C-alpha cells in the first residue's frame, strides 16, 4: 500500500507486476540508489543517537590473518599496559558500516579510501619469499631468474607468486604451472611454510615474527612493496569510546617497533 501511494504521488509506476514477479521500471531503477543512500544515512543517524557507544567493551573488527599472526602475540602487552581495556575482536575482510554493525573501529588492509570513516595509516606492507632454514640451506637464495624453479612453492590467491615474478621480471611466462600447495588464506600460507612444505610469498606483517624468531628465513634481500597498507578506521558518527585513544596509541607504538624486512 505504501508503494502504491508512492507511485500515485509520483504519478508514474516504479514496478512492473506480472503475477508474483515484480521488477523495477526505469524510473524505479533510477530512484533506487538515492533512496538506499537516504535510508542508510537515516539508519546511521538513528543508530548513533539510540545507543551510547562510549560504554562497554571496545569492539574492533580486523582481518583474521592480522589477528592470528600479528595481534595475538602482542595482546598480553596490551593487557599489561592497559588492564582496564575490555577488547572485543570481530574478524572480517569486508568494510563494515561501523555504526550500524556496532563496531567502534576497524583495522583493514587497503589504499585508504573508505567512505564515511576517518582513517589513520598504521603500517606499510611488503611481500617476501620465506621458507624454513632447512629448505633455504638446501636451495639457496633467490638471485636470478632460475632460482625459484629450485623450490617447491606455496601459493596464496591474494598474494600470488605471479606478483613477485612480474615485478622482478624473473620469468617470461608467468602462466607456467608451479609445483606446491595453493590456499586462499594468507595466514595459512605462513603456516605451510613453517611446516617446510615450500617457499611462500607472504605478507611481511604475517611472517616477520617467525623470521625474527629464526623459524623462517627470507630467501631474498629485495622485498616487494605491497600496494595495500594497514589502516585504523573509526566512524565519524557518535561519541568516541573512551578506550579507543589508548588502544590507538598502543597499536601505533607496537607497529613502530615492528622491524622492516631485510633490504628495507
Image (cartoon, rainbow, N blue to C red):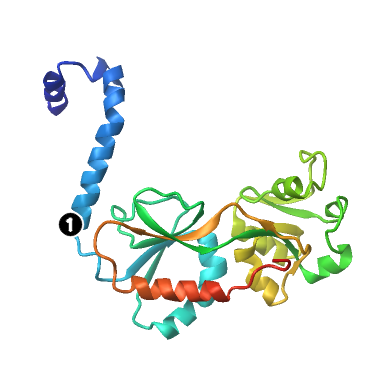
In the picture provided, is 17 more to the left or to the right than 63? left
Which of the pair 124/66 is nearer the observer?
124
Q: Residue at x 56, y 53 (%)?
A: 228
Q: Residue at x 28, y 52 (%)?
A: 100
Which of the pair 16/263 is nearer the observer?
263
The quadrant in which residue 15 appears is: top left
Residue lying furthest top in this view?
18
In the picture provided, is 43 more to the left or to the right than 247? left
Crowd around label 1: few <14 · some 14–19 · many ≥20 (10 Å): few
The quadrant in which residue 17 appears is: top left
Residue 163 appears anywhere in the view: yes
Measured from the top left, where is residue 256 in percent x and y?
A: 54, 73
Quadrant location, the C terminus: bottom right
In the picture provided, is 33 more to the left or to the right than 151? left
**Vertical placement of residue 208 versus 227, above or below:** below
Residue receiving disc 1: 49
Measured from the top left, where is residue 8 in percent x and y?
A: 12, 19
**Vertical placement of residue 134 versus 159, above or below:** below
Residue 19 appears anywhere in the view: no
Amino acid at each position: 500500500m505504501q508503494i502504491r501511494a508512492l507511485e500515485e504521488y509520483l504519478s508514474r509506476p516504479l514496478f512492473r507486476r506480472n503475477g508474483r514477479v515484480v521488477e523495477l521500471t526505469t524510473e524505479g531503477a533510477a530512484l533506487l540508489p538515492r533512496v538506499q543512500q537516504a535510508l542508510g544515512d537515516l539508519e546511521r543517524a538513528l543508530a548513533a543517537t539510540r545507543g551510547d557507544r562510549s560504554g562497554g567493551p571496545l569492539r574492533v573488527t580486523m582481518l583474521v590473518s592480522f589477528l592470528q599472526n600479528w595481534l595475538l602475540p602482542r595482546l598480553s602487552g596490551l593487557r599489561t599496559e592497559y588492564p582496564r581495556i575490555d577488547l572485543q575482536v570481530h574478524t572480517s575482510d569486508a568494510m563494515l558500516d561501523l555504526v550500524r554493525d556496532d563496531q567502534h573501529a576497524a583495522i583493514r588492509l587497503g589504499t585508504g579510501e573508505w567512505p564515511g570513516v576517518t582513517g589513520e595509516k598504521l603500517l606499510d606492507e611488503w611481500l617476501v619469499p620465506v621458507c624454513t632454514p632447512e629448505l633455504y640451506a638446501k636451495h639457496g637464495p633467490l638471485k636470478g631468474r632460475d632460482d625459484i624453479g629450485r623450490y617447491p612453492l606455496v601459493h596464496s590467491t591474494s598474494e600470488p607468486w605471479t606478483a613477485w615474478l612480474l615485478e622482478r621480471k624473473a620469468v617470461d611466462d608467468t602462466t607456467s604451472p608451479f609445483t606446491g600447495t595453493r590456499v586462499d588464506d594468507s595466514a595459512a600460507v605462513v603456516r605451510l611454510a613453517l611446516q617446510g612444505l615450500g617457499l611462500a610469498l607472504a605478507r611481511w606483517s604475517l611472517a616477520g615474527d617467525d623470521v625474527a624468531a629464526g623459524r623462517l628465513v627470507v630467501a631474498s634481500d629485495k622485498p616487494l612493496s605491497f600496494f595495500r597498507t594497514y589502516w585504523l578506521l573509526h566512524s565519524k558518527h557518535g561519541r568516541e569510546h573512551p578506550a579507543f585513544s589508548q588502544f590507538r596509541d598502543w597499536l601505533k607504538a607496537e607497529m613502530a617497533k615492528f622491524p622492516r624486512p631485510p633490504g628495507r
